[in-house]
Amino acid sequence: MSQKTLRIFLFLAILINFYFTLSITPLFNLDEGAFSEATREMFLNHDFITTYLNGNLRFDKPILIYWLQALSTLIFGFNEFALRLPSALAATLWAGGIYFFTKKIFDEKKAVLAAFFMVTALQIGLIAKAAIADSLLNMFIAFSMFSLYIYIIEKKEKYLLLTFAFIGFGFLTKGPVAVLIPLATYFIYSLIRKNFKQFLKDVFNIKGIIIFLIIALPWYILEFKAQGMKFIDGFFLKHNLKRFDTSFEHHKGSLFYYIPVVLIGLLPWTSLFIKYLSKIREFIKNDFVLFGSIWFFFVFLFFSLSGTKLPHYVVYGYTPLFIFMGFAYEKIKSEFLYSLPLILFVLTLLILPFYLKANLVHFKDFTRVAILTLYPYFNKFYFLSLGIILFLALFKYGKEIKTLILGFSMIFILNYVGWIYAHVRALPVKEAAIYVKKHNIKNVVMYHLNTPSFDVYAKMIVEKRYPKVGDIVLTKVTTLKDFNYELLFKKGVIALIKIKPKTKTKEPLNYKKDRRE
């Protein structure tokens, strides 16, 4: 297959996975809903420096992604497409960066393959069209590391200055992590290469520091001027230092948390990742493989040691893996082993409906209701489409054709399963919000839910408290037993009710206002 044909398939994969599917699901909670609602409240408050969520200060992330989402919604309207478009564009540029960097350092074939592996990987497909900051951050991390490595091998200062610029934009996207990853990688690399003096000289490059400050500092100054120590405590201490030191917002896991995350997140290319690990002593003789391996393993180990663990944190180290997969691709001989991760994944999805049905009684009430809502989607199309993918993955076609089959199969599975999940968890919230707007309901209380996408679609700020008589309440169907109510709307796991008399008005001792369910 020619390089031109491979580039065409790469282009199609980007269009389908990053753009054509931007609007097929409503906004997911928690993160997409939170970012989108914070962007909506920027317009509501006429404040484009400080972000708010549900009327409260939100210091989770810096400002750049909110500005880009705001600009996108001004052009395309306030909808899922516009809110997700900045992430899709960032992912496209990220893939383009992988292609051009790999072509410059290695060759055209590895470049096309590396970009295709990135575009079709499971976790990339998730964040590339999510209305969150991670696609943008990963783009800037990748660009800063590419620029840094080119500087290391060519010694041209313009690439070092570009590194500082990309780090500055990353710092404006998600804060200190954008500085930490390139700094730590270069530090370890310089120790191995016994070039620590050059590291110090480059890190303290005055022109580079000025470029970084010009890009990143103005918003931080304006935000500190507006919010003072609340910003320092909320952003730097709570959402950065505390995330490493403690399990933040119940996102915890063992030291081995990221092993299954990586193995699943890199699907369908897990075999190539394992091949890279098995051949690392051979591959690491190449200088960039050394540099990129330091990059990946630092990210992996750092976040494994962090008190707060979320699946997308490890993606910050994925970029070099897609390039290494080009080396592994040349080494892998068995098409069956190449396809095995996808085969196992599809078999799991085929078995899943039967497992859930057999174990339904063992799940908690809310999960049981969610599973029952899933059942209608385990239909003939579900089994037929996955069966066809399994059939295609089992036969030999040559590695290039098999690569296309695996990649596009993953795109289909990701978006189809995501569409099913959306109908259970996201669509009911959106339709409840549409009901509220249609019936001109002005105030809603949220009980035992944290679904900021409701605020986005209903275009209102929602109170989170224990309901009182007369309140309109958005809640889970499993909490309806707590109230005497009139049912206004019910779908899936979500219900909208009006509290009637003879309901307990005293807040239960075990009620938590900030539950993240």
Image (cartoon, rainbow, N blue to C red):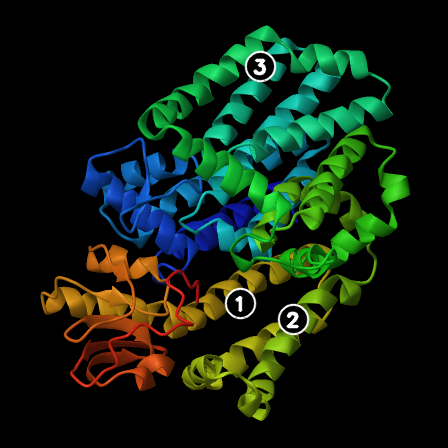
Which dot, 3 or 2, sits closer to the camera?
A: 3
Which dot, 1 or 3, sits closer to the camera?
A: 3
**Quick one: label 2, few (<14), some, or many (20+) residues within 10 Å?**
some
Is 393 drawn above or below residue 248 in the view shown? below
Disc 1/disc 2 C-alpha distance (Å): 10 Å
**Residue 124 rendering spot, x and y as whole percentages:** 55, 51
Depth check: 352 or 213 in front?
Answer: 213
Asked whether the residues under the numbered discs 1 and 2 touch, taking CB atoms below 8 Å apart as contact, a structural biologist would say yes
Badge 2 element: helix
Task: Name the N-terminal-most of marks 3 and 2.
Answer: 3
Q: Which residue shows up at 60% across the image and 72% down it?
A: 389
- Quadrant of residue 408 in the image? bottom right
Which residue lies most toward the right here?
Answer: 281
Q: How many marks?
A: 3
Q: Which residue is mark 3?
A: 161
Q: Which residue shows up at 20% across the image and 39% down it?
A: 45
Task: Name the N-terminal-most of marks 1 and 3.
Answer: 3
Badge 3 element: helix
Q: Which residue is mark 1?
A: 413
Q: Amino acid at mark 1?
A: Ile
**Residue 105 rendering spot, x and y as whole percentages:** 71, 28
Q: Amino acid at mark 2?
A: Phe
Q: Which residue is mark 2?
A: 345
